Image: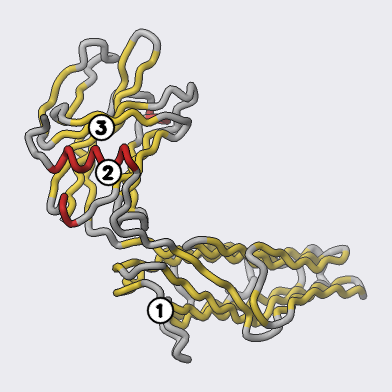
Amino acid sequence: MPSDPRLTVVLALALTGTSLLSQVPSVSLSAPNTLSIRAAALGRTASASRPSGLLATTDRMEAAVPGAAVSTAWSAAGEFVEIIETVDLGDHSAIGSIGPHTYLMQFAASASAPAVLRIERSTTVSIGTPWPAVDIDLGNDGTIDISNPGSEVTVPVTGFGPAGFAVRLVVATQASGMQSARSTLRFRMVPDNDFSVIRTATGCAEPAVRDLYVNPIFAGRGMRIAAGPSLDHNGVVLVFGARSQPTILPLGAGNCILMPSVDVTIDAFGIYSAVDIPLPAAVRPLTLQVQGVRWVPGILETTDAVEIRIR
């Protein structure tokens, strides 16, 4: 019996897949106005467009002539939206234009709980190319809240749920001559499940397979614990402990230390060995020590060890 009885609850939830509160996320992507792109070079012109309205979950527009190629692509599913805009010119007479494009994202979930909107931007341009314009209106209230964002922006969303949360995005890219530009914008709604993770020890497995990932999930205000990748598909045994109790593994590779007390173990199989664990109020607050142990012919190897503080 684990020293903390709440670990028994955690084990039961993980093994049964029980979700006491399920936020099922969704997102729709639409264009209030027509989307259009244009490429021109050497006296030839190409264009492409999409009418205003609800957009397909995955689509791509391309306009290309010799010496100029322009494209816009997007995908929207679950809690994630990605938009990629590219201009690639290879002639001094070339012109490429995207937009301005306006996108409207409507994020929603089947139940209410705190969440965080993570916005990521990656932009590369050739020397002399104008910087692509990116403006973001949080809540779609007509006010630009974020102009020309950096690589990552985090926005708390209190009470994210059925009422939804709207985001209006306005983007534009212009280039000419021998210029090029590419922008990737990602919007992901992530549950704010009120836990933190601290790495407490480095595992003795090879660097490529020693990571232990802990990420929030919408199901049950819980977490997904994953170790990987396992190239032999053998998976790992996840060891959960109520306290830190370092122990040298008898068949470990060198000085291989298991950090948690061995209170609960869960087998996780597959290339990326993952277990989803709901975290209802009944198990909060709780501090867990977690580490993965993998059997490699003849020896035991460990992943990194972490302490998870669930509030």
Q: Which mark is residue 7?
A: none
Q: Which mark is residue 13?
A: 2
Q: Which quarter of the figure has residue 268?
A: top left
Decide which of tag 3 and tag 2 comes sooner along the chain. Answer: 2
What is the secondary structure assignment of the residue under circle 2?
A: helix
Residue 116 coordinates in the image, percent (x, y): 35, 67
Residue at the disc numbered 3? 291
Residue at 17 percent across and 29 percent down: it is: 259
Horizontal side, residue 295 vs residue 272: left or right: left
Q: Nearer the viewer, residue 176 or 52?
A: 52
Horizontal side, residue 32 vs residue 283: left or right: right
Q: How many marks?
A: 3
Decide which of tag 1 and tag 3 comes sooner along the chain. Answer: 1
Q: Quadrant of the N terminus?
A: top left
Task: Give me the C-alpha separation between circle 3 and circle 2.
Answer: 18 Å
Decide which of tag 2 and tag 1 comes sooner along the chain. Answer: 2
Q: Which quarter of the figure has residue 45?
A: bottom right
Q: Residue furthest right?
A: 43
Q: Is residue 55 above or below residue 151?
A: below
Q: Residue furthest left?
A: 3
What is the secondary structure assignment of the residue under circle 1?
A: loop
Q: Which mark is residue 163?
A: 1
Colouring style: secondary structure
Q: Is residue 273 visible?
A: yes
Q: Is residue 221 visible?
A: no
